[in-house]
Image (spheres, rainbow, N blue to C red):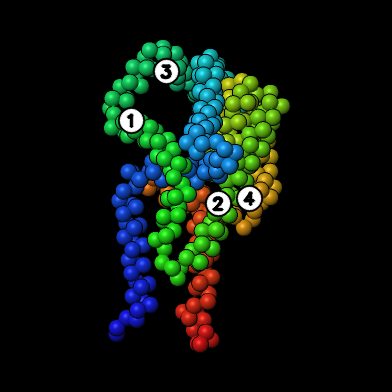
Amino acid sequence: MPLSSANKIRLSWAALGAAGLALLLLLAPMLMPFLVALTLAYALHPAVDRLVRCRVPRALGAALALLLLRGALAAVGSLIVSVVQQTVPQLRQQVPVLLTHVGTWLDALSARVGIRGAVDLDALRQALTRMLAGDPQHWSAQLLSSARSGGGLLLNWTANLLLIPVVTFYLLLDWDALMRRAFDLVPLPRRASLRALLGECDTVLARYLRGQLVVMLILAVFYSAGLAVAGLQLALPIGVFTGLAVCVPFVGFGVGLVLALLAGALQFQSVYALGAVALVYGVGQVIESWWLTPRLLGSHLGLHPLLVIFLLLAFGSVFGFVGVLLALPAGALLLVLARRGVSWYRSSALFLGDSGA
């Protein structure tokens, strides 16, 4: 049965899409810095356009935007370093004492229930003490040895970190021209529908990014204040880190919760730490799920938790850790495309059948 011209065109576009997807999967490691740079350029180009309207040269505006982004990332990195620097000495001093208390409690519990034999945690306590008491020179030698063994991976990460700002800068310089040239390649009959689709995607993604940024800032303030009221010494760095890390669902919240529980257990060495941290993080999760996300992101942007897990695993397996960061923005775009596809399917002859005729 010969194919009509319309079906031939559809098959051609389907073949091109399949070939593009295969090429994307094949070149995923090499395309990762360009994908990150494209995402950063999309997020930063409105700010650069505003600077250009204020008569700031575009090259200077792009450089300023990248410097501000670098400062924000450096601030987050300093928070992580601050938590590590203040937690490791506490681990060194208080973990042996904490293990002694745990051993005493286990001995009393075993005697109460009639179990013979004592619980000996001396070996574990001595091993942890030796590990945490290592001098910085020994740790530096181990880190250097690990870097030598994984030299290829380290070199790859270093090259990407140097390449991403350069590619982002050039994309910001030529953003409007690149978008115009790409749109000129679209077939004339499809330009109106594509312009409407791109406008919807831009609106959804911009709303998502702005709403997510506000959610992160509000939660950073809430967790910092809540942990400070609970008396945690590391309330500010852990609270800010947790608020900023909620951009990665489940992972960011889980890491922040573990850090807060560890810091609370080392500081208070009582059940109060567990209860206080659980209360603060439980209230924060309720506020985020039932008030902040529906109000600032919109219920129509909500993704099912199972879909979120799938996106995190899929993008993480293809693009690594950067893919985990890009999973939710990509999910918002895929949601728009899925709505368009469902709308087209419901109006097609395949769905309507005889009633469509």
Q: Which mark is residue 205?
A: 2
Q: Residue 341, image x and y in percent? A: 49, 67
Q: Residue 184, image x and y in percent? A: 42, 60
Pick the front one: 77 or 290 = 77
Q: Secondary structure at mark 4?
A: helix
Calculate the distance from the C-alpha at mark 2 to the C-alpha at mark 4: 10 Å
Q: Which residue is mark 3?
A: 131
Calculate the distance from the C-alpha at mark 2 to the C-alpha at mark 1: 33 Å
Q: Which residue is mark 1?
A: 154
Q: Residue furthest right?
A: 229
Q: Are marks 1 and 4 in contact (CB under 8 Å)?
A: no
Calculate the distance from the C-alpha at mark 2 to the C-alpha at mark 3: 46 Å
Mark 2 or 1: the one toward you: 2
Calculate the distance from the C-alpha at mark 1 to the C-alpha at mark 4: 37 Å
Which comes before the other along the chain, label 2 or label 4?
Answer: 2
What residue lies at 59% left-to-right and 28% top-to-bottom?
238
Left or right? Give the position of 13 relative to 344. Answer: left
Q: Are marks 4 and 3 in contact (CB under 8 Å)?
A: no
What residue lies at 34% left-to-right and 58% top-to-bottom?
20
Pick the front one: 106 or 49 = 49
Question: In which quadrant of the rendered view does residue 46 lie?
Answer: top right
Q: Secondary structure at mark 1?
A: helix
Which comes before the other along the chain, label 4 or label 3?
Answer: 3
Q: Secondary structure at mark 3?
A: helix
